[in-house]
């Protein structure tokens, strides 16, 4: 454990599919047990991320929070800047902004094309950063043109921007221009691979590794037995397999044809057909799933390859409240020593 | 009898256990959308302040569980060995 020399933080992700008061209840619980970050996903077909964050922020006092992640196709970065700046007024110094290229499937539902994602994310980060810094922005970009954009209210503390990334180029960009990288991965092999590209981005920007918050944004399911945790995580893993690039599938010896079949079944909402091919290898590759002991082991492996924030993403477990309590009682104590030492 | 008065009759030694079990009922109820927003916010207020296992917090959780899951709430009070509470809750239906 002593070989890990950086601060370890824990984040939790909620999908606002649930009623607002349930998400807020769990957000309060997450803060109470010691999570450092609260991330709420941004999909137009769920409850609005900023409304969800605003109410969660009103009932919490310490936890940092932000969209995890929004995208510039659905929301103009000028509006994202406005939203996070407003949140920062409610909870000064606690707001972070997670940004990515979006989820292709959801964007397609609104007929939005995921065009030039690297350029779009790069320009968006510039817009959000400049506007939330209180500056007047003039920018002639390839995607966005901004002519004298400025907030009509003051913002008192900077808002760190985390970039969600999975592919090599986005990882490199995220490390180059982001304050943090949210790596879409649950397995140390994928994170280890991502670190190569993150290293390139850091070098390009002339940064130090410690300047960057490197987070593994995992699919997490903890329960008293593997089977219970598995049942909750299977649908999430099916979606991840369906959306993973071939290179990632090959890294985990998952056949591309199987992934294609799962994708096809998801598109046509044939759930049994989509979820039944999910096997133990897929679950191992794309989630942290099992008893607290298993989860602790996988978290240790992620920390060893250079991550300093673990985000426990959907589904968390078969029973949200119990699983969050289980994380408090049986997962966090294994990392307390590191957290204690590093925070002092 | 009003729920507030009924809640007051739950022995303090059972507040923790009753609160825990009622919260589970409320959070896992398929009828969760019936929760009045004002009541939800009151519960969140008490939850943030660690007061759901106090007399006033328990009353609000009981109120929510009687809206979402009246029969299960009554069964739970039976399990907790509170027959008088069961009778009073039944009278509110």
Image (spheres, rainbow, N blue to C red):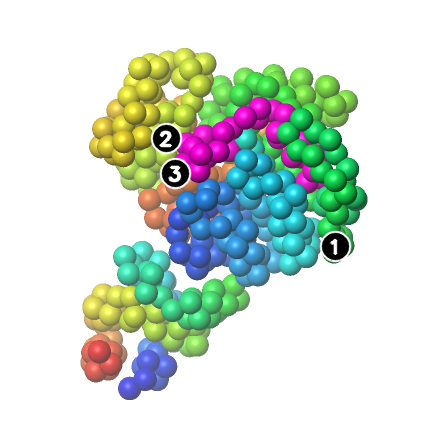
Q: CA distance from mark 1 to mark 3?
A: 43 Å
Per the image, is A114 magenta?
Answer: yes
The residue pinned by badge 1 equals A152
Q: Chain of mark 3?
A: A
Q: Which residue is mark 3?
A: A221
Query: In the rendered image, which quarter is residue A111 located in?
Result: top left
Residue A194 on the magenta span = no
Marked residue nearer the N-terminal end (3 or 2): 3
Please identify the quadrant where the C terminus of chain A is shown: top right
Q: Quadrant of residue A309?
A: top right
Q: Is residue B25 above or below residue A148?
A: below
Other residues around mark 3 within 10 Å, as few (<14) / some (14–19) / many (≥20): many
| Label 2: element kind | helix
The image shows residue A317 at horizontal and vertical percentages of 37, 43
Residue at image point 41% right, 36% down: A109
Q: Please state the chain letter of the residue tagged with numbered disc 2 in the rendered image.
A: A
What residue sits 42% from the left and 22% below the top? A244
The stretch in magenta equals: A102-129
Q: Secondary structure at mark 3?
A: strand
Which residue is under mark 2?
A: A239
What kind of element bears circle 1?
loop
Above or below, comparing residue B38 to residue A87 in the picture = below
């Amino acid at each position: 454990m002593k070989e890990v020399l950086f601060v370890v933080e824990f984040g939790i992700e909620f999908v606002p599919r649930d009623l607002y008061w349930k998400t807020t209840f769990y957000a309060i619980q997450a803060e109470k047990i010691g999570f450092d970050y609260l991330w709420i996903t941004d999909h137009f077909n769920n409850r609005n991320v900023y409304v969800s964050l605003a109410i969660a922020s009103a009932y919490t006092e310490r936890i940092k929070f932000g969209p995890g992640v929004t995208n510039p196709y659905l929301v103009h970065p000028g509006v994202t800047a406005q939203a996070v700046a407003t949140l920062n007024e409610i909870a000064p110094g606690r707001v972070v902004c997670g940004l990515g290229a979006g989820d292709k499937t959801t964007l397609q539902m609104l007929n939005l094309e995921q065009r030039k994602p690297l350029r779009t994310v790069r320009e968006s980060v510039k817009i959000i950063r400049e506007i939330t810094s209180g500056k007047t922005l003039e920018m002639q970009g390839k995607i966005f043109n901004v002519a004298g954009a400025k907030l009509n209210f003051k913002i008192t503390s900077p808002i760190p921007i985390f970039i969600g990334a999975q592919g090599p180029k986005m990882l490199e960009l995220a490390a180059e221009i982001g304050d943090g990288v949210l790596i879409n991965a649950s397995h140390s092999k994928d994170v280890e691979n991502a670190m190569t590209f993150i290293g390139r981005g850091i070098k390009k920007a002339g940064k130090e590794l410690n300047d960057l918050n490197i987070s593994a944004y995992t699919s997490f399911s903890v329960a008293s037995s593997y089977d219970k945790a598995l049942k909750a995580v299977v649908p999430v893993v099916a979606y991840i397999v369906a959306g993973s690039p071939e290179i990632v599938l090959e890294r985990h010896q998952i056949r591309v044809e199987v992934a294609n079949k799962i994708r096809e079944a998801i598109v046509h909402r044939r759930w049994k057909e989509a979820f039944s091919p999910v096997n133990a290898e897929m679950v191992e590759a794309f989630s942290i799933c099992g008893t607290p002991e298993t989860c602790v082991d996988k978290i240790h492996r992620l920390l060893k390859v250079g991550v300093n924030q673990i985000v426990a993403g959907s589904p968390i477990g078969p029973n949200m409240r119990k699983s969050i309590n289980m994380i408090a009682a049986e997962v966090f104590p294994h990392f307390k020593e590191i957290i204690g030492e590093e925070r002092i | 009898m009003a729920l507030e008065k009924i809640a007051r009759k739950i022995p303090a030694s059972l507040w923790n256990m009753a609160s825990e079990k009622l919260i589970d009922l409320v959070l896992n109820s398929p009828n969760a959308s019936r929760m009045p927003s004002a009541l939800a916010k009151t519960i969140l207020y008490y939850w943030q302040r660690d007061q759901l296992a106090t007399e006033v917090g328990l009353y609000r959780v009981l109120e929510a569980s009687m809206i979402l899951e009246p029969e299960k709430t009554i069964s739970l009070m039976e399990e907790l060995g509170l027959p008088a509470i069961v009778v009073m809750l039944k009278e509110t239906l």
